[in-house]
Image (cartoon, rainbow, N blue to C red):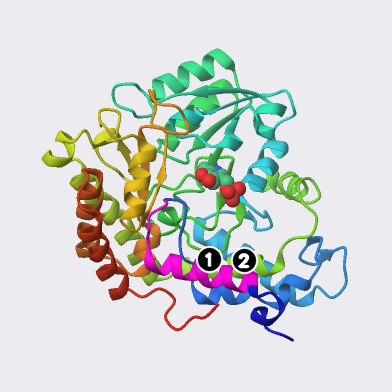
Amino acid sequence: TQPLSAVDPEIAEVLELELGRQRDYLEMIASENFVPVSVLQSQGSVLTNKYAEGYPGRRYYGGCEYVDIAENLAIERAKSLFGAEYANVQPHSGATANAAVLSAITTPGDTILGLELAHGGHLTHGMKLNFSGKLYNAVAYGVDPETMLVDMDRVRDAALEHKPQVIIAGWSAYPRHLDFAAFRAIADEVGAKLWVDMAHFAGLVAAGIHPSPVPYADVVSSTVHKTIGGPRSGFIVSRDTELAKKLNSNVFPGQQGGPLMHVIAAKATAFKIAASDEFRDRQERTLRGARILAERLTAEDSRSAGIDVLTGGTDVHLVLADLRNSKIDGKQAEDLLHDALITVNRNAVPFDPRPPMVTSGLRIGTPALATRGFGDAEFTEVADIIALALQGSDTAALRSRVEALTSAFPLYPGLQQ
Ligand code: PLP
Protein backbone atom coordinates (compact mmCIF):
# COMPACT_ATOMS: atom_id res chain seq x y z
CA THR A 1 0.00 0.00 0.00
CA GLN A 2 3.03 2.27 0.18
CA PRO A 3 3.41 4.72 -2.72
CA LEU A 4 6.22 4.37 -5.22
CA SER A 5 7.98 7.44 -3.86
CA ALA A 6 8.36 5.65 -0.52
CA VAL A 7 9.17 2.16 -1.83
CA ASP A 8 11.55 3.19 -4.60
CA PRO A 9 12.40 6.88 -4.68
CA GLU A 10 14.96 6.37 -7.45
CA ILE A 11 12.36 5.01 -9.87
CA ALA A 12 9.81 7.57 -8.66
CA GLU A 13 12.29 10.24 -9.68
CA VAL A 14 12.71 8.70 -13.14
CA LEU A 15 8.92 8.91 -13.65
CA GLU A 16 8.85 12.51 -12.54
CA LEU A 17 11.80 13.50 -14.71
CA GLU A 18 10.32 11.76 -17.74
CA LEU A 19 6.96 13.50 -17.26
CA GLY A 20 8.85 16.80 -17.11
CA ARG A 21 10.76 15.96 -20.30
CA GLN A 22 7.56 15.06 -22.13
CA ARG A 23 5.99 18.32 -20.99
CA ASP A 24 8.94 20.54 -21.84
CA TYR A 25 10.02 19.22 -25.25
CA LEU A 26 8.15 19.20 -28.53
CA GLU A 27 7.74 15.46 -29.11
CA MET A 28 8.19 14.83 -32.83
CA ILE A 29 9.35 11.23 -33.00
CA ALA A 30 6.97 9.92 -35.65
CA SER A 31 6.31 6.63 -33.86
CA GLU A 32 5.42 8.24 -30.52
CA ASN A 33 2.27 9.71 -29.07
CA PHE A 34 0.70 10.63 -25.71
CA VAL A 35 -1.89 8.20 -24.39
CA PRO A 36 -4.96 9.67 -22.71
CA VAL A 37 -5.25 9.46 -18.92
CA SER A 38 -7.99 6.82 -19.38
CA VAL A 39 -5.40 4.55 -21.02
CA LEU A 40 -2.85 5.22 -18.27
CA GLN A 41 -5.49 4.14 -15.77
CA SER A 42 -6.01 0.70 -17.30
CA GLN A 43 -2.30 0.16 -17.72
CA GLY A 44 -1.66 0.96 -14.09
CA SER A 45 -4.54 -1.21 -12.89
CA VAL A 46 -5.07 -4.54 -11.10
CA LEU A 47 -5.62 -6.23 -14.45
CA THR A 48 -1.83 -6.57 -14.53
CA ASN A 49 -2.23 -9.32 -11.90
CA LYS A 50 -4.27 -11.66 -14.06
CA TYR A 51 -3.14 -14.70 -16.00
CA ALA A 52 -5.44 -15.43 -18.94
CA GLU A 53 -3.69 -17.78 -21.38
CA GLY A 54 -6.09 -18.72 -24.13
CA TYR A 55 -8.90 -16.65 -25.61
CA PRO A 56 -12.17 -15.28 -24.17
CA GLY A 57 -14.40 -18.17 -23.10
CA ARG A 58 -11.54 -20.67 -23.66
CA ARG A 59 -8.95 -19.85 -21.03
CA TYR A 60 -6.45 -22.08 -19.29
CA TYR A 61 -6.98 -20.23 -15.99
CA GLY A 62 -9.95 -19.63 -13.70
CA GLY A 63 -11.26 -16.22 -12.76
CA CYS A 64 -11.18 -14.78 -16.27
CA GLU A 65 -14.81 -13.63 -16.36
CA TYR A 66 -13.96 -9.92 -16.17
CA VAL A 67 -10.86 -9.84 -18.32
CA ASP A 68 -12.90 -11.72 -20.96
CA ILE A 69 -15.22 -8.72 -21.12
CA ALA A 70 -12.26 -6.42 -21.73
CA GLU A 71 -10.75 -8.61 -24.45
CA ASN A 72 -14.09 -9.10 -26.22
CA LEU A 73 -14.63 -5.32 -26.23
CA ALA A 74 -11.15 -4.78 -27.68
CA ILE A 75 -11.75 -7.43 -30.39
CA GLU A 76 -15.17 -6.09 -31.41
CA ARG A 77 -13.96 -2.49 -31.47
CA ALA A 78 -10.90 -3.36 -33.56
CA LYS A 79 -13.08 -5.26 -36.05
CA SER A 80 -15.57 -2.44 -36.32
CA LEU A 81 -12.91 0.29 -36.57
CA PHE A 82 -11.10 -1.39 -39.46
CA GLY A 83 -14.00 -3.19 -41.16
CA ALA A 84 -12.48 -6.60 -40.41
CA GLU A 85 -14.07 -10.00 -39.77
CA TYR A 86 -11.31 -11.06 -37.40
CA ALA A 87 -9.10 -9.40 -34.79
CA ASN A 88 -6.48 -10.61 -32.36
CA VAL A 89 -5.63 -8.03 -29.71
CA GLN A 90 -3.12 -10.08 -27.71
CA PRO A 91 0.24 -9.22 -29.34
CA HIS A 92 2.48 -7.56 -26.76
CA SER A 93 4.08 -5.44 -29.48
CA GLY A 94 4.19 -4.77 -33.18
CA ALA A 95 7.17 -7.09 -33.54
CA THR A 96 5.33 -9.96 -31.83
CA ALA A 97 2.28 -9.40 -34.01
CA ASN A 98 4.53 -9.60 -37.06
CA ALA A 99 6.24 -12.77 -35.85
CA ALA A 100 2.82 -14.37 -35.37
CA VAL A 101 1.66 -13.27 -38.83
CA LEU A 102 4.72 -14.66 -40.56
CA SER A 103 4.60 -17.96 -38.71
CA ALA A 104 0.89 -18.29 -39.56
CA ILE A 105 1.25 -17.75 -43.30
CA THR A 106 4.68 -19.24 -44.11
CA THR A 107 7.01 -22.07 -43.27
CA PRO A 108 10.64 -21.36 -42.37
CA GLY A 109 12.74 -21.16 -45.50
CA ASP A 110 9.98 -19.50 -47.53
CA THR A 111 10.77 -16.35 -49.48
CA ILE A 112 9.38 -13.04 -48.17
CA LEU A 113 9.53 -9.80 -50.14
CA GLY A 114 9.39 -6.48 -48.28
CA LEU A 115 10.58 -2.88 -48.50
CA GLU A 116 14.33 -2.53 -48.04
CA LEU A 117 15.17 -1.52 -44.45
CA ALA A 118 17.41 1.31 -45.64
CA HIS A 119 14.53 2.63 -47.78
CA GLY A 120 12.06 2.79 -44.89
CA GLY A 121 11.18 -0.86 -44.21
CA HIS A 122 11.02 -2.42 -40.75
CA LEU A 123 13.33 -4.87 -38.97
CA THR A 124 10.59 -7.52 -38.88
CA HIS A 125 10.23 -7.43 -42.67
CA GLY A 126 13.42 -9.38 -43.26
CA MET A 127 16.41 -7.70 -41.61
CA LYS A 128 19.15 -10.30 -41.34
CA LEU A 129 19.62 -10.10 -37.54
CA ASN A 130 15.84 -10.24 -36.93
CA PHE A 131 13.89 -13.53 -36.74
CA SER A 132 12.39 -12.60 -40.12
CA GLY A 133 15.79 -12.51 -41.79
CA LYS A 134 17.05 -15.60 -39.99
CA LEU A 135 14.08 -17.89 -40.57
CA TYR A 136 13.13 -16.81 -44.07
CA ASN A 137 14.77 -16.11 -47.38
CA ALA A 138 14.22 -12.36 -47.19
CA VAL A 139 14.43 -10.32 -50.38
CA ALA A 140 13.60 -6.65 -50.84
CA TYR A 141 12.25 -4.05 -53.21
CA GLY A 142 13.55 -0.50 -53.00
CA VAL A 143 12.35 2.98 -53.89
CA ASP A 144 13.09 4.64 -57.21
CA PRO A 145 16.36 6.64 -56.92
CA GLU A 146 14.87 9.64 -58.74
CA THR A 147 11.40 9.93 -57.21
CA MET A 148 12.12 8.09 -53.91
CA LEU A 149 8.72 6.46 -54.39
CA VAL A 150 7.85 2.77 -54.23
CA ASP A 151 7.55 1.94 -57.92
CA MET A 152 5.04 -0.87 -58.48
CA ASP A 153 6.81 -1.99 -61.65
CA ARG A 154 9.91 -2.68 -59.56
CA VAL A 155 7.83 -4.50 -56.95
CA ARG A 156 6.33 -6.65 -59.70
CA ASP A 157 9.76 -7.35 -61.24
CA ALA A 158 11.10 -8.41 -57.83
CA ALA A 159 8.03 -10.60 -57.23
CA LEU A 160 8.36 -12.28 -60.64
CA GLU A 161 12.07 -12.83 -60.08
CA HIS A 162 11.91 -14.19 -56.51
CA LYS A 163 8.46 -15.83 -56.46
CA PRO A 164 7.89 -15.01 -52.77
CA GLN A 165 5.31 -16.80 -50.63
CA VAL A 166 4.58 -13.49 -48.90
CA ILE A 167 4.68 -9.89 -50.09
CA ILE A 168 4.91 -7.27 -47.35
CA ALA A 169 3.57 -3.75 -47.77
CA GLY A 170 4.25 -1.35 -44.91
CA TRP A 171 6.95 0.92 -43.62
CA SER A 172 8.57 2.74 -40.72
CA ALA A 173 9.82 5.70 -42.72
CA TYR A 174 8.03 6.50 -45.96
CA PRO A 175 5.98 9.65 -46.54
CA ARG A 176 3.41 8.48 -49.11
CA HIS A 177 0.48 6.10 -49.56
CA LEU A 178 1.13 2.61 -50.84
CA ASP A 179 -1.00 1.26 -53.68
CA PHE A 180 -2.63 -1.70 -51.92
CA ALA A 181 -4.69 -2.70 -54.98
CA ALA A 182 -1.51 -2.95 -57.06
CA PHE A 183 0.18 -5.00 -54.30
CA ARG A 184 -2.85 -7.32 -54.30
CA ALA A 185 -2.67 -7.77 -58.06
CA ILE A 186 1.04 -8.63 -57.91
CA ALA A 187 0.50 -11.04 -55.02
CA ASP A 188 -2.24 -12.78 -57.02
CA GLU A 189 -0.06 -12.91 -60.11
CA VAL A 190 2.75 -14.75 -58.29
CA GLY A 191 0.54 -16.73 -55.90
CA ALA A 192 1.78 -14.93 -52.77
CA LYS A 193 -0.06 -13.88 -49.64
CA LEU A 194 -0.25 -10.12 -49.05
CA TRP A 195 0.56 -8.92 -45.54
CA VAL A 196 0.22 -5.22 -44.77
CA ASP A 197 1.95 -3.80 -41.69
CA MET A 198 0.04 -0.57 -41.00
CA ALA A 199 1.82 0.09 -37.67
CA HIS A 200 2.57 3.69 -38.58
CA PHE A 201 -0.53 4.83 -40.41
CA ALA A 202 -3.26 2.83 -38.61
CA GLY A 203 -4.65 5.95 -36.91
CA LEU A 204 -5.07 7.68 -40.26
CA VAL A 205 -6.82 4.58 -41.62
CA ALA A 206 -9.13 4.45 -38.59
CA ALA A 207 -10.05 8.09 -39.20
CA GLY A 208 -10.76 7.42 -42.88
CA ILE A 209 -8.09 9.79 -44.16
CA HIS A 210 -5.72 7.14 -45.52
CA PRO A 211 -6.65 4.22 -47.81
CA SER A 212 -7.43 1.07 -45.85
CA PRO A 213 -5.36 -2.03 -46.58
CA VAL A 214 -7.95 -4.33 -45.00
CA PRO A 215 -10.01 -5.01 -48.16
CA TYR A 216 -6.86 -5.96 -50.09
CA ALA A 217 -4.57 -7.80 -47.68
CA ASP A 218 -4.82 -11.38 -46.48
CA VAL A 219 -3.72 -10.10 -43.10
CA VAL A 220 -2.95 -6.71 -41.56
CA SER A 221 -0.81 -6.14 -38.48
CA SER A 222 -0.32 -2.96 -36.50
CA THR A 223 0.88 -1.29 -33.36
CA VAL A 224 -1.52 0.66 -31.14
CA HIS A 225 0.92 3.27 -29.84
CA LYS A 226 1.85 5.28 -32.94
CA THR A 227 -0.83 7.29 -34.78
CA ILE A 228 -3.62 5.54 -32.86
CA GLY A 229 -2.14 6.89 -29.63
CA GLY A 230 -3.04 3.89 -27.45
CA PRO A 231 -0.95 1.63 -25.22
CA ARG A 232 2.39 0.28 -26.46
CA SER A 233 1.31 -3.02 -28.08
CA GLY A 234 0.17 -4.72 -31.29
CA PHE A 235 -2.87 -6.31 -32.94
CA ILE A 236 -3.83 -8.21 -36.06
CA VAL A 237 -6.93 -7.88 -38.24
CA SER A 238 -8.14 -9.72 -41.29
CA ARG A 239 -11.25 -10.13 -43.38
CA ASP A 240 -10.28 -13.75 -43.97
CA THR A 241 -11.91 -15.85 -41.24
CA GLU A 242 -10.24 -18.95 -42.67
CA LEU A 243 -6.94 -17.62 -41.35
CA ALA A 244 -8.37 -16.89 -37.90
CA LYS A 245 -7.48 -20.19 -36.24
CA LYS A 246 -3.94 -20.13 -37.59
CA LEU A 247 -3.37 -16.53 -36.57
CA ASN A 248 -4.73 -17.12 -33.07
CA SER A 249 -2.60 -20.19 -32.46
CA ASN A 250 0.48 -18.41 -33.76
CA VAL A 251 -0.01 -15.55 -31.29
CA PHE A 252 -0.79 -17.92 -28.40
CA PRO A 253 0.85 -20.37 -27.87
CA GLY A 254 3.04 -19.67 -30.93
CA GLN A 255 4.72 -16.47 -29.81
CA GLN A 256 3.39 -15.58 -26.39
CA GLY A 257 2.22 -16.95 -23.06
CA GLY A 258 -0.16 -14.93 -20.90
CA PRO A 259 -1.68 -11.85 -22.53
CA LEU A 260 -1.19 -8.47 -20.83
CA MET A 261 -4.79 -7.90 -19.76
CA HIS A 262 -4.14 -4.38 -18.45
CA VAL A 263 -2.80 -3.46 -21.89
CA ILE A 264 -5.67 -5.21 -23.68
CA ALA A 265 -8.19 -3.21 -21.62
CA ALA A 266 -6.29 -0.05 -22.56
CA LYS A 267 -6.43 -1.11 -26.23
CA ALA A 268 -10.23 -1.43 -25.95
CA THR A 269 -10.38 2.17 -24.71
CA ALA A 270 -7.99 3.38 -27.41
CA PHE A 271 -10.17 1.75 -30.11
CA LYS A 272 -13.29 3.31 -28.60
CA ILE A 273 -11.66 6.74 -28.73
CA ALA A 274 -10.46 6.08 -32.28
CA ALA A 275 -14.08 5.83 -33.45
CA SER A 276 -14.86 9.37 -32.22
CA ASP A 277 -15.13 12.69 -34.05
CA GLU A 278 -12.50 14.14 -31.74
CA PHE A 279 -10.07 11.43 -32.92
CA ARG A 280 -10.79 12.19 -36.57
CA ASP A 281 -10.13 15.87 -35.92
CA ARG A 282 -6.82 14.97 -34.27
CA GLN A 283 -5.76 12.82 -37.24
CA GLU A 284 -6.68 15.63 -39.64
CA ARG A 285 -4.55 18.07 -37.63
CA THR A 286 -1.75 15.48 -37.67
CA LEU A 287 -1.87 15.29 -41.45
CA ARG A 288 -2.12 19.04 -41.98
CA GLY A 289 0.74 19.57 -39.54
CA ALA A 290 2.99 17.25 -41.54
CA ARG A 291 2.05 19.05 -44.77
CA ILE A 292 2.85 22.43 -43.22
CA LEU A 293 6.21 21.07 -42.09
CA ALA A 294 6.99 19.75 -45.57
CA GLU A 295 6.06 23.10 -47.13
CA ARG A 296 8.27 25.08 -44.72
CA LEU A 297 11.22 22.74 -45.12
CA THR A 298 11.02 22.96 -48.90
CA ALA A 299 10.80 26.77 -48.86
CA GLU A 300 13.55 28.70 -50.65
CA ASP A 301 15.68 29.55 -47.59
CA SER A 302 15.69 25.95 -46.30
CA ARG A 303 16.54 24.54 -49.69
CA SER A 304 19.38 26.94 -50.14
CA ALA A 305 20.76 25.58 -46.84
CA GLY A 306 20.66 22.08 -48.38
CA ILE A 307 17.50 20.98 -46.57
CA ASP A 308 14.78 19.26 -48.53
CA VAL A 309 12.14 16.61 -47.91
CA LEU A 310 11.99 13.20 -49.53
CA THR A 311 9.42 12.96 -52.35
CA GLY A 312 8.86 16.72 -52.03
CA GLY A 313 6.07 16.40 -49.47
CA THR A 314 3.93 13.98 -47.49
CA ASP A 315 0.58 12.20 -47.45
CA VAL A 316 0.96 10.93 -43.89
CA HIS A 317 1.95 11.94 -40.37
CA LEU A 318 5.65 12.35 -40.99
CA VAL A 319 8.18 14.18 -43.07
CA LEU A 320 11.60 12.85 -44.00
CA ALA A 321 14.07 15.70 -44.10
CA ASP A 322 16.73 15.04 -46.71
CA LEU A 323 20.14 16.40 -45.71
CA ARG A 324 22.22 14.74 -48.41
CA ASN A 325 23.10 18.16 -49.82
CA SER A 326 23.45 19.85 -46.45
CA LYS A 327 26.60 20.62 -44.49
CA ILE A 328 24.93 19.20 -41.40
CA ASP A 329 24.29 15.48 -41.14
CA GLY A 330 21.42 13.63 -39.44
CA LYS A 331 23.19 13.36 -36.11
CA GLN A 332 24.06 17.05 -36.01
CA ALA A 333 20.52 17.97 -37.04
CA GLU A 334 19.04 15.77 -34.29
CA ASP A 335 21.35 17.43 -31.76
CA LEU A 336 20.53 20.96 -32.99
CA LEU A 337 16.83 20.27 -32.58
CA HIS A 338 17.39 18.71 -29.16
CA ASP A 339 19.13 21.93 -28.10
CA ALA A 340 16.02 23.78 -29.27
CA LEU A 341 13.82 21.46 -27.12
CA ILE A 342 12.54 19.42 -30.06
CA THR A 343 12.84 15.63 -30.08
CA VAL A 344 13.16 13.83 -33.41
CA ASN A 345 15.19 10.90 -34.66
CA ARG A 346 17.86 10.89 -37.31
CA ASN A 347 17.05 8.46 -40.05
CA ALA A 348 18.92 7.10 -43.03
CA VAL A 349 17.50 8.25 -46.36
CA PRO A 350 17.52 5.84 -49.32
CA PHE A 351 20.95 5.75 -51.01
CA ASP A 352 22.39 7.53 -47.97
CA PRO A 353 26.04 8.41 -48.46
CA ARG A 354 26.62 8.77 -44.69
CA PRO A 355 27.04 5.86 -42.24
CA PRO A 356 23.95 4.51 -40.34
CA MET A 357 24.95 6.05 -37.00
CA VAL A 358 25.23 9.47 -38.66
CA THR A 359 22.73 9.41 -41.58
CA SER A 360 21.55 12.18 -43.92
CA GLY A 361 17.99 12.44 -42.75
CA LEU A 362 15.55 13.24 -40.00
CA ARG A 363 12.18 11.61 -39.44
CA ILE A 364 9.84 14.25 -38.08
CA GLY A 365 6.31 13.31 -37.01
CA THR A 366 3.26 15.27 -35.93
CA PRO A 367 1.01 12.76 -34.05
CA ALA A 368 2.11 13.59 -30.49
CA LEU A 369 1.81 17.34 -30.98
CA ALA A 370 -1.62 16.94 -32.60
CA THR A 371 -2.66 14.96 -29.52
CA ARG A 372 -1.33 17.82 -27.43
CA GLY A 373 -3.80 20.04 -29.26
CA PHE A 374 -1.65 21.72 -31.93
CA GLY A 375 -3.40 23.02 -35.05
CA ASP A 376 -2.25 24.79 -38.20
CA ALA A 377 -0.98 27.93 -36.44
CA GLU A 378 1.13 25.99 -33.95
CA PHE A 379 2.49 23.63 -36.60
CA THR A 380 3.47 26.63 -38.71
CA GLU A 381 5.40 28.02 -35.75
CA VAL A 382 7.02 24.60 -35.10
CA ALA A 383 8.00 24.32 -38.77
CA ASP A 384 9.62 27.74 -38.65
CA ILE A 385 11.52 26.87 -35.48
CA ILE A 386 12.80 23.64 -37.05
CA ALA A 387 13.84 25.37 -40.27
CA LEU A 388 15.70 28.05 -38.29
CA ALA A 389 17.37 25.50 -36.00
CA LEU A 390 18.60 23.48 -38.98
CA GLN A 391 20.04 26.66 -40.47
CA GLY A 392 22.02 27.23 -37.27
CA SER A 393 19.91 30.00 -35.75
CA ASP A 394 20.46 31.07 -32.12
CA THR A 395 19.14 28.26 -29.90
CA ALA A 396 18.20 30.41 -26.90
CA ALA A 397 15.70 32.38 -28.94
CA LEU A 398 14.26 29.19 -30.39
CA ARG A 399 13.92 27.62 -26.95
CA SER A 400 11.80 30.49 -25.74
CA ARG A 401 9.52 30.10 -28.77
CA VAL A 402 9.16 26.39 -27.90
CA GLU A 403 8.44 27.26 -24.27
CA ALA A 404 5.63 29.56 -25.40
CA LEU A 405 4.06 26.62 -27.27
CA THR A 406 4.48 24.03 -24.52
CA SER A 407 3.07 26.34 -21.86
CA ALA A 408 0.06 27.20 -24.05
CA PHE A 409 -0.70 23.46 -24.49
CA PRO A 410 -0.04 21.83 -21.11
CA LEU A 411 0.48 18.07 -21.19
CA TYR A 412 -1.34 15.96 -18.59
CA PRO A 413 -2.43 19.00 -16.57
CA GLY A 414 -2.58 18.16 -12.88
CA LEU A 415 -1.03 14.71 -13.34
CA GLN A 416 1.61 13.71 -10.83
CA GLN A 417 3.81 10.67 -11.19
N1 PLP B 1 6.10 -2.50 -37.79
C1 PLP B 1 6.44 -1.26 -38.15
C2 PLP B 1 6.17 -0.82 -39.55
C3 PLP B 1 7.05 -0.41 -37.24
O1 PLP B 1 7.42 0.82 -37.61
C4 PLP B 1 7.28 -0.88 -35.92
C5 PLP B 1 7.91 -0.02 -34.89
O2 PLP B 1 8.72 0.77 -35.08
C6 PLP B 1 6.94 -2.19 -35.60
C7 PLP B 1 6.34 -2.97 -36.55
C8 PLP B 1 7.29 -2.80 -34.28
O3 PLP B 1 6.59 -2.35 -33.21
P1 PLP B 1 7.12 -2.60 -31.72
O4 PLP B 1 8.18 -1.61 -31.48
O5 PLP B 1 5.89 -2.44 -30.90
O6 PLP B 1 7.64 -4.01 -31.67
Q: Is 113 situated above or below 278?
A: above
Q: In the figure, is residue 218 to the left or right of 36?
A: right
Is 354 in front, or is 179?
A: 354
Locate residue 391, reporting x and y percent. Answer: 21, 43
Q: Please report the bounds of the magenta region as a residue range.
A: 10-29
Q: Quadrant of residue 243?
A: top right
Q: In the figure, is residue 320 to the left or right of 398?
A: right
Badge 1 is on which residue?
A: 271
Is 290 in front, or is 283?
A: 290
Pointer 1 residue Cβ closer than 8 Å to ligand 1? no
Task: Confirm whether the magenta stretch covers residue 25.
Answer: yes
| Extreme residue in the bottom direction | 1
Locate residue 301, reporting x and y percent. Answer: 12, 41
Task: Tell me which residue sits at (47%, 59%) in the image.
Answer: 228
Locate residue 264, reporting x and y percent. Answer: 65, 65
**Mark on residue 74?**
2
Q: In the figure, is residue 161 to the left or right of 347?
A: right
Visible residue check, residue 350: yes
Task: Tell me which residue sits at (61%, 57%) in the image.
Answer: 233
Q: How many marks?
A: 2
Q: Name the amino acid, label 1.
A: Phe
Q: Is 250 situated above or below 14?
A: above
How far apart, in angstroms, are the residues tagged by discs 1 and 2?
Answer: 7 Å
| Extreme residue in the top direction | 161
Q: Are marks 1 and 2 in contact (CB under 8 Å)?
A: yes
Question: What secondary structure prevails in the magenta region?
Answer: helix
Element assignment for label 1: helix
